[in-house]
Image (tube, rainbow, N blue to C red):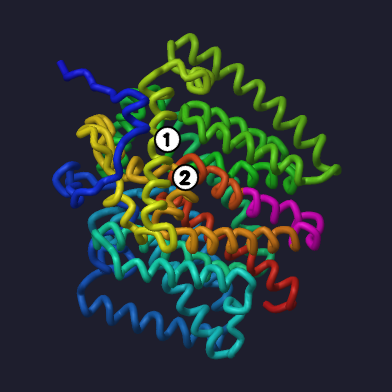
Amino acid sequence: MSRPIDYPSFIQELYYKPNQAPPSYSSEFPQDFPYDPGATSSLYELGYIPSQSSFILLMILVLLFFSLLLFFFLRSKARYFFSFTMIFAICLSFLGPLRLSGGIRFQTTLGVAKFIALGSFLIGFLYDVFRRNMSIVHHRSFVPIAFYLVLSFFSVFWLTNLNFFLSDMNLIITGLLFYGAAFYHLGQENHVRHLAISLSYLILFPAIFVLGIFLFPSYGSIIMSWIFPRYENIVFHFDLSRDRILSIIDLEFFIPFVCYLYLASKKKHKASVIFLLSFFAVLLTNYRYRFLSFVVGVLAYVVLAGRQHFKQLLLSTGVIASLVFISYIVISTTLGRTTIIDRFLMKSYENDVDSLRRRVVMARQALDVFRQFPLLGVGVGNYKDNVQVYIENYGGRTYEPTYKILQNVYAYPHNWFLLLLAENGIVGLCIILWMLYEFLRTDIFLYRSLREEKWIRFLAFSVTSWLYVFANMFTPLHNSLPMVIIFWSFRGILARMEWNMRFSYE
């Protein structure tokens, strides 16, 4: 029989002291199943370079060289090829960290997606340099993004753990590579349309995955152990013990694409079925932030879609959502399963009340670190080494034993802006707010300029990207590689849409 967990009192939680001793995390958490978003200790293992073999590296350079020649001499066909390659890479994100067979050097689909983005960005950038156009440099969002990247690299001068630094920098660089690759290769309307429709149908994959596990949990365990790395398996079983189901991607953020499909397609029943299944899947995951993000995403799209679509969307989504929610409550009550209503009413101390209290402590931790280093922060990746409370089994990367498997989640303050304050200081936060302001200006311009199908399609990309920012205020999505890829790809697409409209450049 396991020893009962000794929870600290709320007063003890609030009056901790920031870590003053040298970090000791290397011996406090298990090393055999780290969360692997594609980043480890070497550049080869980061997933951008397939192998340390010099022969394979030579083949890659040769491939990039001939791809560049193709881009110069067969521009239209080459652009068509790279556009659909980028669509393929973005769609791979819906598979999450799906483990590939041993014959492929990349360990997961995300590694393949990152390599595609790297090659596509290099080709697009070199072609831009050759033409002396440098369109990406002249876009309004380039300056704050460049400042943020430079400030992040400066963290190397005061890093405390190289692995933590490389892991977080990998996420930042991956996002910016997808931003640049999408900017260069997803500017044409037909390509953006193909991507939007593909994403709306791809939601079925994680939705059916969640529904299948709910109906057949034993088979779900077998499938998880077969196709996903060990970390995902451990979190999957941990979620099942709490009446939750692991979703391989945050499907709730893509509901605006289902709304777009409903308006753009003559066959409304297809979008209705996807909406029904995805909402039921979101409810079954039993996460509060997923439910809130789903509702906010639907309402934002319905409101922004304008008068001509408001009643149609509101009626359709309202009827389907009501039927799904009632069915979900009846099924969950019959099975004695915890519902999303229970989670909001905080009926469980361990899963609900204590979870919110910990977020208060995490916020205090981040603010205390910021007060110690207010200007430039402690540096990218250094937050984990500057946060540790005095209670042995509560704080930093350990918490009580059951949360060791979530070490990389609870090593962040569950708020992206607080993390920016702690790691990049007031300077970094201001740069990010500047960047988001430029993103908002881009979206306002497109909202006022686009018409008909282009307009409702733009809304799907825009609302989804802002949902990412919204959810990052209460869950650490900034360290989720699939969502990092999606967010920056969408921002690159929107930036290119604005560039094309302002300068009529293809």
Q: Report the Cα–Cα distance between label 1 and label 2.
A: 9 Å
Q: Residue furthest right?
A: 308
**Circle 1: element type:** helix
Residue 185 visible in rendering: no
Across and down, in percent, residue 181 comes to 51, 70
What's under tag 1, amino acid-wise? Arg
Task: Tell me if residue 197 comes above or below residue 211 in the rendering.
Answer: below
Task: Tell me if residue 451 comes above or below residue 55 in the rendering.
Answer: above
Q: Closest to the observer: 405 or 368?
A: 368
Q: Closest to the observer: 4 or 493?
A: 4
Taking the spot 37% from the left edge, 45% from the top edge, the residue there is 412
Q: Indicate whether residue 455 is drawn in magenta.
A: yes
Mark count? 2
Taking the spot 60% from the left edge, 67% from the top edge, the residue there is 186
Taking the spot 50% from the left edge, 66% from the top edge, the residue there is 85
Provide the residue designation for mark 1. 359
Q: Are marks 1 and 2 in contact (CB under 8 Å)?
A: yes
Across and down, in percent, residue 15 comes to 34, 33
Q: Closest to the observer: 310 or 408?
A: 408
Across and down, in percent, residue 226 comes to 27, 41
Provide the residue designation for mark 2. 415
Write down the region rendered in magenta: 446-463
